[in-house]
Each structure stands twice: as C-alpha cells, then as structure tokens.
Image (cartoon, coloured by chain):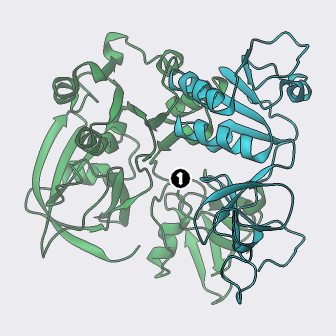
Chain colours: A green, B cyan
Amino acid sequence: MSALLEVQVAAVRQLTPVVREFTFAAVNGRLPGFSSGSHVQVVLPLAERTLRNAYSLLGDPRDSGVYRIAVRLQEASRGGSRYLHEQVQVGDRLQIGVPSNLFPLHSLARHHILVAGGIGITPFMAYLAELEAQGASFELHYAYRSGLTDAYTAELQARLGARFHGYDAAAGQRLDCANLLTGKPLGSHLYICGPQRLLDDLRARAAALGWSAGRLHWEAFAAPEPGLPFTAELTRSGQRIAVAGDHSLLEALEAAGVEVPNLCRGGVCGQCATGYLGGEVEHRDHYLDEQQRSHVLMPCVSRGGCSGPLLLDL
Amino acid sequence: MTAPSAEPMFSTPRYATVPNRRPALYRVLVAQDAALATTLLDHLAPTLLLSLGGELSAAVEHEQLPSSEALYLRLHALLDQAQAGTCVQAIGDEVFVWQVHRVARQAGLLGDEIELFRQGARRRLYCVHCTRLQEIGAETESSCSHCGVRLLVREHFSQRLGAYMGVCIDPDRPFATVVQP
C-alpha cells in the first residue's frame, strides 16, 4: 500500500445496534478526492496485531472535505470491527490509505440497478450522490433486517421515493432475484454488494436471461478466512516466515517487513498477485484462472499447506 | 507500412463462424440477404429476422426492409424498446455488419451480445488524410475517391467507424495522382 494519510475521527454515529458510522477529517491539509464506489484501507492497531480493513466511502464524491465509512460489527470478527466499535472515539487519530476504486459506476449504462444486502449499502451511498447529480436513471434494492442492519433506510426512503425498494427480513420480505431482473431496459447495468449468496443468485439469474457478464458489477469485501498455520519461504532472500492460522499470508509478509502492493485485501482485485515456485497452495481468490494458479497466488486470502514450506518468488 | 504477418493486428476484426449458444431473452438476426441466414438458423432460431430481401424457407418471423437505411432505423426502433437479455446477430459484408454493430452498441448492447458473420468482400475505407469514407473490395491499395491520394489499406480497423485505415502509400506523393472528375 502506498502512503498513509493521518486522519482524526470527527464524528461517530451509532446507526443500528451493529452498524456504526465514522467521519474522518484530515489532520494536515486536505483529503484526496475520490470517485463513487471507492474504498479506503483503515489501519487498526489492535493490541496483538495490526489489521488493515477496507471500507467503502459513503459520502458525496464532490465533497471530499471529510470521509465517511460505516462499519458492521462482525460476530466472527478478527477484531477489526470490534476495535472500531468499542475503542475508537471522537478525536482519536487513525491512519488510512488513499482511496482506490474497484467498483466504479459504468459510464455507458442507461439504467443502473443497485442491489445491497445489509452493510453492502455503503458503496451505494456514494453512488446515489453521483447518480442524482447526473440525473441518471436508477433504482435501489436494499435487503436488510429492521432493528439490526437497516442503516439509512429512513433517509433512503425519503430521498428516493419510488426508486427505493426495501426488503425487511424481520417482516418476512424477500428480495426476489428473478423478478428484479425481469423487464429491464436494454442498457441496464446491475451492481451488487452483499453476501455471496445474493451475488451467486443474481449472477445465475442474469446469465439465464441472456445478460452479458459485462452488465454485472459487484464488490465483496470479506476478511480472509482463517486456516491452518504454515511456513512461507522467500526464495530470493532465503527468509522463512511463519504464518499463523488467523493471519493471512499478506499480513505475515507485511509483519516481516515485506511490502506487497495490494488494494482490496479480499482476493478480488489482483493487485497482490505473487509468484510461487513450489509448495502446496490453497487458492481462495476470485481473480486468477486455473492456468495462472499454477504459478501465481493471491496472498491476501490464499494459504500454503502444512506438507512443506510455500516457496515464494520474493 | 504494415508488413504482412502471420498474426492479424489486435484491431483487425475476427468474425464468428458458429453462433454461440448462450441463452437470450430475445434474438434478432439481421441479414443483408435472408438466404445467407439459413446456415445460422440450424443452430439457434432467432425471435425475429430483419433482412433486405431474399428467400428463406424456414418458418421464422421475417421483416423485409427496402433499403439499408430503413433497416437500420427499424433495428434502432426495435432495440429502443428492447429489454436487457436481447442479443443481435448480423450476417452480410463488412460495411453492413458494422453498421448493424454501431446501431446495436448505440442502443446499449455490449460487445459480447453482438455476433457478426461476414459474407462478401465489400468493406469500408477511411482516408486518414481527408477523413472521409468510401467503399472498397478486397484490394490492399486504393485511391481515395474524395481527395485522390493513393492509399495503402491497413489492417488497422476502427470499430467506431466500421472502417479500415487508409494511409498515403508514397510519402513523395502526398497529393492526388489523378484529377477527380
């Protein structure tokens, strides 16, 4: 990751029992501009380790005076969301990365269909500002559970009127993926941010209707799943790095002072692709094809095996 | 100048030979000559066939249009009302299929929702000196019918213009060699 920005927590809002919104202001100078769909990595100095979690920027891209993110408390958290929920207070200083965008709006779309599941609403908050400013045709579908993951629902309902379609799981309302894609105009593009199940369902429905894969855009930030501990060997320096079960290979490399370029830290963007020369690999990314997997891995999510060291071309 | 090479240039169009079997909500087949479409019908039946004429034995909804311009307008109107999941197949010479491509892209179709099948040698040439278009056949050299410069027909193709690039073949003669009538 390139240069870090120093920010101060300017405001904290508890939106729901599990969603907390943070506003960051620059400590020195101005924050860089960003486009809708961008995210930042937030450096979280936990007691036992430092995490870098990626969060979408919520605000209006034309107003980059402050950055806003919303964080869902994850039960099976590695500690990042818990730290933000329980430790971080107004006035605290944090380090964040510069914004980057892996989920931009498609500029040639005639109609934008946004589908959010729970905390997946966050990138669309920035989209809405952009789409409204452009006077673009769009609709938002938001599946949530009232009293738990219903961040911004009242605001969205008032702001979007008939373009807002809410599905409250607590009231037994289900988002019907087939219905959602039926009868959409030719230039439609679909943007999905939510659980894997929602993404898989929509992708299958769209393909069955003859939609080109190019009409679908998604973002799935997921923390790396833990695994078994293993050892990585940097073949150029001979250095050996032990990777604990609850650390990703990327985190272990960073802890050892090895910088690997990275953006999403969730196996989708391809930035951290690293060559390997031998050893067992458990590929967990959504980026590499089978042929590439024979010699490249994504250290942000993928892991080595326990049969012997993973030999990295580093 | 372009030396002949085994590999076509990146921009040189590659045409489909067999239609893909991806599902589609609505399939429009646009044919310069309906008789040419017969080979494609064996694979997947279109919802609608638009053509400039020609005989077709298969039972497919078929609209014949009197001119290319009428056909492009009809396709435009059709796609304007169409839903996502529509795909377009075009069969004809390069001038024809790239006009269809242009109409389809303007309507919001993505590149992989359009399939082009080439039949015939007629193609378009863009003169990079006077920026005008003309129609040519398979020849690799031509004189610009507008500015008269002798042109080399490059393999480099513009999808937007649906045309190959024509560049002055002789740098010592960057002007008309024949006086145009």
Q: In which quarter of the image is the N terminus of chain B?
A: bottom right
Q: In this view, does A39 lie to the left or right of B62?
A: left
The amino acid sitting under disc 1 is: Pro
Q: Is residue A302 left or right of residue A126?
A: right
Q: Which of B141 and A272 is in front in this view?
A: B141
Chain ID at mark 1: A
* One can see residue A109 in this view: yes
Relative to B165, does residue A128 appear above or below in the rendering?
above
Most distant residue in the front direction: B181
Q: Which quarter of the picture shows residue A87?
A: bottom left
Q: Is residue B113 left or right of residue B31?
A: left
Q: Which quarter of the picture shows residue A287?
A: bottom right
Q: What element carries label 1?
A: loop
Residue in the picture at 52% in, 17% down: A182
* One can see residue A305 in this view: no
Return the x and y of residue A268 as percentages of the image width and height: 54, 54
Mark 1 highlights which residue?
A: A226
Q: Say how many tags the image has.
A: 1
Residue in the picture at 46% in, 82% down: A257
Q: Nearer the viewer, residue A310 or A153?
A: A153
Return the x and y of residue A67 as percentages of the image width and height: 20, 57
Return the x and y of residue A60 as percentages of the image width and height: 21, 49
Relative to A174, does residue A5 appear above or below in the rendering?
below
Q: Which quarter of the picture shows residue B56?
A: top right
Residue in the picture at 85% in, 68% down: B7
Relative to A300, does residue A150 appear above or below in the rendering?
above
